[in-house]
Image (spheres, rainbow, N blue to C red):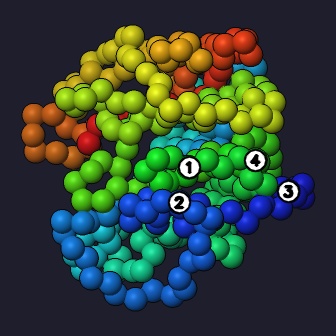
Amino acid sequence: MARAPVSVRRAVSVVGLLCAAACGDSVPEPPSRPTGEAPVESDPAQARAYDRHFVFMSFAGDSALVVPWLMRTVERPGAVDREARGWLDRGGRWEAFYAERWEAPPTRSPDRVLPHGNLKLMVREGDAVDGIIFEEGPRRLEIALGSSRAIWTGPRGGAVELVEGAAYLADQRVDGLVLHMARASVGAAPAGGDWAFLMSGDSLQIVLAAHIEHGGEVEPVYRGWAELDGEEIQWSAIRLDWSQTQAFPPARRDVPVSWRVTTTNRAIEGALRARSSDIAAGEGSGPLRPVRALFEVAGNVSLGDAGSFPVHGLLVHERR
């Protein structure tokens, strides 16, 4: 089957923004990236962690196609630990089709995503990722990134980008949107908390991201970004409270299954509920184990005078 081309992507480098986040600098225009790799010294007290997430989503009625790729890099003395995971959600049926961890030598660009095994990448100048390919025998799943629709930065740096995209499964093409999120942390600071990517047809796209995990001494505050009929909106302080939880015995924790969205000025309000999920416990020696949960969610969101919108999307919950 011949592919219809995805529109040419605008050359915006989220990698440069992510580097500024990890270094604690303000975020100017995306800088040029260094080329090549060479060993660098690493201070354990200033160890850096980088998250790069790519999520393709397409919804048509009750038919959903969601392909999250979650990637994390952690620097430590003398090495870089890398992790990449991929899921496929079709109509509420989740499949974790890729999960790899590997060690790599030190590099000047640890925030750069790299191919590994059945994970292939298409990258253009400036380290902009144009495509992510999973290939295993006759099976092939490709996410192609097209033109950038919007890009936002947060107070800690990092970046959130909305990109036109398409998914190719065997001989089938599905058009949709891709969220590209880049976050970083230095030292003991967490890389960030839960986040969500929501859509309402072609008119509204919302991204919510917490600055810390749930369950600590301080409750997380979410920042929000949205594109509504081509107009960009930002919120600096959103609450995403758990309105219902359920026990997840493998991690000895409760996980959320419904949420309430609020702001003090009622600029955005709403409710979300989990329609399906993939929940897994991580490795740990303590009484509580790490947990990562991916939820396909649905609900309604009100944006003040702009009205109320039914939304559908992905919410990622993580406790380390």
Q: Is residue 250 visible?
A: no
Secondary element at image label 1: strand
Provide residue 162's location: percent of width, then percent of height.
68, 46
Nearest to viewer (mark 3 / mark 1): 1
Identify the image quadrant of the N terminus. Answer: bottom right
Q: Which residue is mark 1?
A: 153
Q: Amino acid at mark 3?
A: Ser
Q: Which residue is mark 4?
A: 149
Q: Is residue 234 left or right of residue 283?
A: right
Are the two marked residues, 1 and 4, in contact with CB atoms closer than 8 angstroms? no
Marks 3/1: CA–CA distance: 24 Å
Which sits earlier in the primary sequence, circle 2 or circle 1? 2
Marks 1/4: CA–CA distance: 14 Å
Which sits earlier in the primary sequence, circle 3 or circle 1? 3
Are the two marked residues, 2 and 3, in contact with CB atoms closer than 8 angstroms? no
Q: Amino acid at mark 4?
A: Arg
**Vertical placement of residue 75 versus 96, above or below:** below
Are the two marked residues, 3 and 1, in contact with CB atoms closer than 8 angstroms? no
Marks 2/1: CA–CA distance: 8 Å
Q: Foreground: 140 or 19? A: 19
Residue 27 is labelled as 2
Secondary element at image label 3: loop
Provide residue 58's location: percent of width, then percent of height.
72, 35
Q: Which residue is mark 3?
A: 7
Q: Residues within 10 Å of mark 2 (few under 14, many from 20)?
A: many
Nearest to viewer (mark 2 / mark 3): 2
Q: Is residue 284 left or right of residue 24?
A: left
